[in-house]
Amino acid sequence: MGVIPLTDVSRRPARFPVMTASIIAVNALVFLLELIRGETFVTSWSVIPAGIVAGHHLITILTAMFMHASWSHILGNMIFLWAFGPEVEDLMHPRRYLVFYLLGGLAATAAQVAADPSSTVPNLGASGAIAAVMGAFLVTYPRDRIRSLLVIFVFVRTAYIPAALLIGVWFLTQFVNLGAVAQQPAGGVAYAAHVGGFIFGAVTARLFEGPRLVEAGVTT
């Protein structure tokens, strides 16, 4: 069974989420460059943990968080960002939100490098930064209902899932998988980045909040 979050039905942002939309646009542009320039471009701008530890190509800590390995990778990440990003951006306001997003990505990369500092496998993707956004959403709006698609084999239905349940189960899955990978190393998913980004977002979200607007339109 798969769950695809779509949108928060408990509240609507007071402003159009221009920064979230811009981040999605940048990710799409970079992915287009990957398709055009090929494998050399991908490996040149992805994070290589061993290289970061040695002090090489540090700019990739930033560039890698806007790159993706496949169509399914970027589509999945951008769907999650659009599901949770607008409300967090509205809470923080665009500039604070951008700083938070980038720092979340940096924290995620640091966690992944720390988990396997000798790795020479390229790491790329926005998942860590998006995990930070999800962590912020969880501590801020845990009772909001998220309209989601439940995919069970070939059957698809719409469900309204509490954010605390949806995000909580997601994080638990990442944490359990991180433990399994630690015991039996394998390439694939950067679970340490997901866990690190999420913890950063959950712990620091309140520090980035902007002035509160009247929430008269909020429903329960």
Image (cartoon, rainbow, N blue to C red):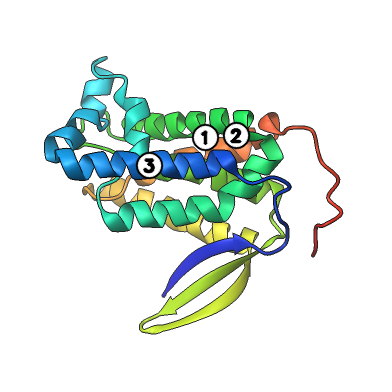
- Is 148 in front, or is 107? 148
On screen, 148 above or below 189? Answer: below
Residue 78 spot, x, y in % from top left: 43, 52
Q: Say if mark 2 contacts mark 1, CB within 8 Å.
A: yes
Disc 2: which residue: 97
Residue 204 lies, in percent from the top left, at 62, 33
Other residues around mark 1 within 10 Å, as few (<14) / some (14–19) / many (≥20): many
Q: Position of residue 88 (x, y in %)?
A: 64, 44
**In-image side of 19 versus 142 (left or right):** left
Report the mark closest to the observer, 3 or 1: 3
Closer to the N terminus: mark 3 or mark 1?
Answer: 3
Depicted 197 relative to depicted 156: above or below: above
Three-letter residue code for mark 1: Tyr
Q: Residues within 10 Å of mark 2 (few under 14, many from 20)?
A: many
Relative vertical location of residue 77 with respect to residue 113 in this rendering, above or below: below
Mark-to-mark CA distance, 2 and 3 = 16 Å
Q: Which residue is mark 3?
A: 27
The residue that disc 1 covers is 101
